Image (cartoon, rainbow, N blue to C red):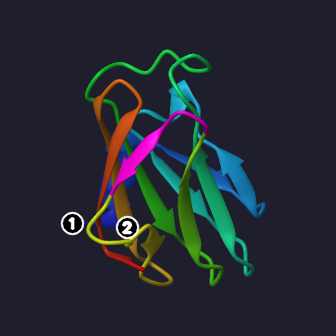
Amino acid sequence: MNLATDFAVFGQNSQSGTAYTVVLADVGKYVETTNGSAVTITIPNSTLVAWPLGAEIHVYQGGAGQVTVAAGAGVTLRAEGTKVKANGQYAVAHLRMRATDEWVMSGDTTA
């Protein structure tokens, strides 16, 4: 993986705050966090966003603040054990919607 070329191909959405709710425009892109404090990225359910089945969103922890991915109301987030956090600065996690309101998180993650 080469983040410089991946960003160019997929596009990116830089977020400097400590909370962000992903939107339809993030599908196929990297959401890059840059905050030094902990960041929570929330996945809203399909009644709020018309997610296409198979949608993928990539999360890149660019700042020192650890990223936690949270399931919004009515959303199930599947991950290995309880690994729903980025593994540290520069880690990349992947989110994929495998069924309506069911997402899978994989990549460089930790509990």
C-beta proximity under 8 Å, tags 1 and 2: yes
Three-letter amino acid code at the position of disc 1: Met
The residue lying at 61 percent from left, 37 percent from top is: 73
Tell me the SS state at disc 1.
Answer: loop
Tell me the SS state at disc 2.
Answer: strand
The residue lying at 68 percent from left, 55 percent from top is: 15
- Of the two numbered discs 1 and 2 on the same chain, state the one appearing first in sequence: 1
- Quadrant where the N terminus sits is bottom left
Tell me the residue that label 2 is attached to.
92
Count of numbered tags:
2
**In this view, which residue lies farthest toward the front?**
74
Residue 59: x %, y % from top left? 45, 57
Q: Is residue 71 above or below residue 56?
A: below
Q: Quadrant of residue 28?
A: top left
The residue lying at 36 percent from left, 63 percent from top is: 93
Q: Which mark is residue 1?
A: 1
Three-letter amino acid code at the position of disc 2: Val
Magenta region includes residue 54: no
**What span is colored magenta in the figure?**
73-78
